[in-house]
Amino acid sequence: MEEILAPAGGKEQLLAAVRAGADAVYLGARNFNARRGAANFEENELFEAVSYCHARNVKVHVTLNTLVTDSELPDLLEEIKYVAKSGADAVIVQDLATAKLVREHCPDIAMHASTQMTIHNLAGAVAAKELGFSRIVLSRELSLNEIKTIAAGTDAELEVFVHGALCMCMSGACYLSSMIGGRSGNRGLCAQPCRLDFRFGEKDHALSLKDMSYVEHIRELAAAGVCSFKIEGRMKRPEYVAAAVNACKTALAGGVPDMESLRAVFSRQGFTDGYFTGRRGADMFGFRSHDDVTAGERVFKSLAALYKDEPQKVPLKMTLSLSEDAPSVLSVSDGENQVSASAAPCRKALKTPTDYDIARRYLSKTGGTPFYLESLDFSAKGEPIIAAGEINEMRRSALARLLEIRSRVIPKEFIEAPLPKAEKHSCGKAAFRLRFEKYEQVCFENSANAIILPIAEIERRPEAISRFGSRLFAELPPLVFPMEEEKLKARLEALKKAGVTDVVCDNIGVLAIAKAAGMTLHGGHGLNILNSVALSEYERLGLSDATVSFELSAAKIRRLCGKIPRGIIGYGYLPLMRTRACPLKKASGCKGCPGTGKLRDRIGKEFTYLCFERKFGTLLNSVPLWTADKDIQGVDFVTLWFTTESPERCEKVYRMFTAGQPADIERTCGLYFRELL
């Protein structure tokens, strides 16, 4: 059954979503949700929200979709406990630590894999299902054909965003906000710096996409196997929520949605369906203009009418028995619950007794409740007549009791157990790993225990295999879209035959493909590991070691527990974004583009953008990370992550870094010595 899933950033938005006709809502609890700036719901408010929604046949999905640190695990467990007590239907999860705690402490609640997990291929969907996720929220960047491919290969439920803001970066792979301002999108506090005026040549707002809208494609998505149509917008007004729900429901029913009102209430110079159609052109870009802002003022009042009144969504079966010599009885059932109300015996009618039509007319007056009369079973003994006031009172009494029953919170079971404990990690002197974008950058002798090259570079320069031997690791693409999965499997088989068995994986789907190919797995920074439980979970999935997130502070890295070796990126122009829409693309397309360019921010800082075979791109930080002169303990290896440096610069950085020298250019220490929000 298809579901319209609406955002509820606060109580007003919840009311708007339900009254406009949403089948489910998603909302945040106190902490650990990707919109910590929304009003969200405290414990009692969450109970009230679930009670209100369940009484009206609306499901509630609670977002627990941020990355967590070890010190936050006790509070996370408490939040899982009160979500369980609330009787919510599902939790939306990003961190594998959260997934483990939910599985072990609240197995009765459904787990949905957040779009923050960057699941964008079939292997990722299958891997998530094996981890206990019953539903996958797919990445927004997929085309209809790619969604069909995933749907055909998994029995997991699929949820797809159909309307709302479109991030420039693949969700879960953006570090722009955290590196620039210390506010992490992976932690629910994105400051949206991408909406500022980054420029590429004459192109302004080169990192800002128009809002997506697949409302008019919603029936195609349903036919493709998507079960849940998600509206973005937990920070938006209730009028926006109501308008989006109304448009989606109209479109799903085969009607013509009101797209003009939808554009007016909120857009960024209109909408785009570029990802859906696979036409990822320059016309996908847009920003919030003055005209966009003023347009909303014209429609707010009319859109508020969409959720002014309580809609009647819950069908009832009623049975009314009237008699002259026994109490009148009204029974009401919603299919699961049954209540009754009674009145005094009826009088004998002098003229017209109460019949089916009269009774139905009074019993149909359910306004102000979520109920409507679907069927009535009427019986009368003799020629009874009942006063309108009496039949109305029976109806009001029965419906009030039924609503009370339906509103009762039915908690999910919560299993009390201590948090998992892991032994402290011990390590000796950290080894070095060198990662290069191009084979030609490796122009110097070194003592690194691993040389990491992209798989395409090893294929281009196979002499690297004999040169580096067992030290050579192949870096797999961080993004492998559905039509590339079989090709990657074949490439891995060829790699194994050539003698390379170690691979670096930055995504759960890519990891699953490499594991099935029998490779030795090394976790990259893109796995977003911030805590000991996640480290342990990835070890269970087959990692031999892992690079922890560069959003984690040095103090927290030092306290990570467990046996699996762990490392950090110690040097490099960090990848701040992975994008499928290209900020360098012109209206004419990719013709003549060298595959790289520089974006400039408002204060003149330059950020290099690298295109990967016209499939996706990476935005690099404007200055390199440099930690050679800093003391980061508790790691087994440090990776120097080379991208655009000349071969001579690579060698100089290596010599300086291994000698523990300070940087000779402007640098950043990243977030290792800042407390990330």
Image (cartoon, helix red, strand yellow):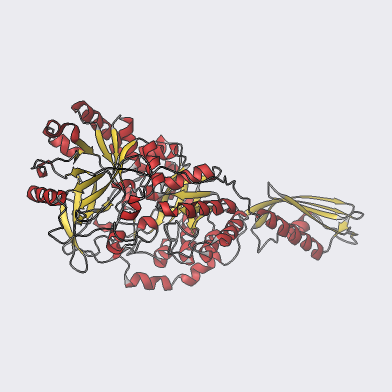
Residue at image coords 77%, 63% = 392
Front in this rendered view, residue 369 or 357: 369
Question: Which residue is at the far top?
Answer: 497
The spot of residue 483 in percent (x, y) is 30, 38
Front in this rendered view, residue 323 or 543: 543
| Count of numbered tags | 0
The spot of residue 394 in percent (x, y) is 78, 59
The spot of residue 534 in percent (x, y) is 39, 45
Residue at image coords 57%, 53% = 58
**Toward which corner of the image does residue 395 lie, by quadrant?**
bottom right
Front in this rendered view, residue 80 or 62: 80
Query: Quick check: can you spot residue 101?
Result: yes
- Asked whether, in this view, residue 639 is left or right of residue 74, the answer is left
Q: In which quadrant is the C terminus drawn? A: bottom left
Query: Quick check: can you spot residue 255?
Result: no
The spot of residue 498 in percent (x, y) is 18, 27
Above or below residue 266? Residue 426 is above
Residue at image coords 19%, 49% = 611
- Asked whether, in this view, residue 581 is left or right of residue 344, the answer is left
Front in this rendered view, residue 249 or 605: 605
Above or below residue 459? Residue 99 is below
- Asked whether, in this view, residue 366 is left or right of residue 37, the answer is right
